[in-house]
Every structure is written in structure tokens, then in C-alpha cells.
Amino acid sequence: MDKNNRILDIALDLGFSSHEMLTRAFKNTYGILPEEYRANPVRLNNFCKPQLLLNYTLVDVNVPLITDGIVIEVSRHFLSSPQHFIGLTVEEPIDQMPGSGKPGIDGLSKVWDALHEGKASIRGLKKDGDELGVAYGGTKPGYYRYFGGVEAISSEAQEGYTTWVLSEGEYIVCAFEAEDFEHLVTDALYKAQRYVFEMWLPNHKLSCKPFSIERYAGHSTDTTRMEVWVMPVPTD
């Protein structure tokens, strides 16, 4: 929301007939007032409109594919030893999952904000270690869990934090790039995941274990590349 414009001017630019109509719509959608959002900006869920015919072409491993405004490359990677991550875990409704759910405040951004605020106090982090986001099954129907963490030397328990171990074994890794971080973690991530789950894996007679990993160098605005990791399972 442009802080240089009055909310009334923004309302009129967006097609609302009054300040009150925009305020009501914003409150109903995101649960906060426009004035509250302006004073304390938070990440909002982005809804990626389903596309039935994305311009995908099946390519072999290690062959870059330029499609729908992003660069995708799939490879097979064998992890010879476990990698450890420490961070925070939340459980949220599946229909509020960023990128494909209904509008609202992005709860996952709160995980990353809290993690980065407390990062300096976490023991045993690897220097320049990667950050990892993991979506996996929830403890109750209609929910999923999300872990956001940073690479560590071990899975030592620390008060207030949870851990994730990236176990040894074979992974399918989909690396992709976008023009900026905002597009990387919304539209580009949605397209890359669809390519992996709906095209690449089925065409190679594979499914995957019930978790999906997002791996990046960090949450800097300069980050324009990330990876999706899945552990393959033969379907035959």
C-alpha cells in the first residue's frame, strides 16, 4: 500500500466508491484495517490463479527449461550424510497455504520473521548455511505443518525451537530462478512445484515421500534462486 497516497485515493484508484468500502473489503479479506496494515506491514497471501495449460516441456535432468517467465532445472542429488536444521514449526489450515489458498495474512512469513529476529541466539549454526522450509502432514484433518529453519551443525534441542533432519538418500531437486524474491516465493514456486509434482515425477513413474522442501541461500531481497527437494518413490 503506497504510504504517499491517502487511503481514499487508493480506494478510488482500485474502483471503490469510498474509503469505507475499501476498509470493509480489506478487513473482511485480511482481518485487519488498511490503516493497521499501513502502520505495521505484514506479508499477505498471494493467490496464484490456477493455469490448466502452463507452457511446460518435459526435459531430461540437468537441462534448463525456460518457461512461463522462470528458469527451471531438474537434477538428481544423493545426500551421503544427514543435514541438520533448527527453527520454528507452525500448523495451519491447508486452504490458507500461500500461493494456492484463500486470501489472508501469510502466517508463514511470521515464522521467518520470528526466526530471523532470534537467529543470533541460536547455538551451533553453520556459517553461511542454507535456509529450509518444509511442508508436511498436519496432526488434524485439513491442516498441514510448516517448518522454517537454518542449517546447523547438529540437531541439538534448544528451548523454543524445533529441528528437522534432511536424511541421507536420493532427492529430486528442482532449481529455479525468478526476477526478484517476491516472485520467487510466490508465482515461481507455484509453477516449479506444479512442474515437479504434476509433470516430471509422473512422467518418470515416480511419486514422493509426504513432504516438500524449499531450500534457499536466505530471505534477502537479493535472493532470486531457490530449490524444491523431494524424495522419490517408484510408483511401479
Image: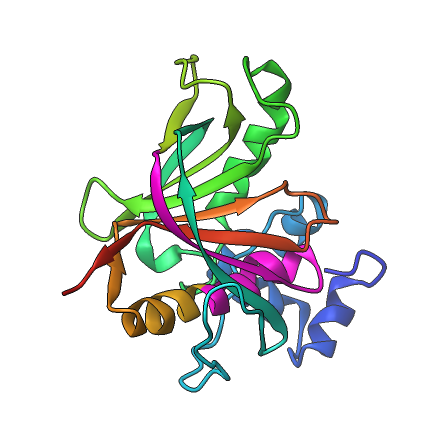
**Along the line of sight, which residue is nearer the eye, 83 or 37?**
83
Q: Residue at x 66, y 47 (%)?
A: 41
- Indicate left or right for 58 with 225 as reference: left
The residue lying at 46 percent from left, 65 percent from top is 61
What is the total number of numbered labels drawn onto the structure image? 0
Q: Is the N terminus in the top left, top right, bottom left or bottom right quadrant? A: bottom right
Q: Does residue 171 lie above or below 127 as drawn? A: below
Extent of the magenta region: 167-192
Say which residue appears at 39% left-offset and 56% top-offset.
96
* Residue 31 seen by the camera: no
Query: Residue 171 appears at what percent x and percent y?
Result: 38, 49
Q: Is residue 89 left or right of residue 30?
A: left
Q: Residue 207 falls in which quadrant of the image? A: bottom left
Could you say which quadrant of the image residue 73 lies in?
Answer: bottom right
Q: Position of residue 183 (x, y in %)?
A: 63, 63
Residue 10 drawn at (x, y percent): 74, 69
**Residue 10, magenta (yes or no):** no
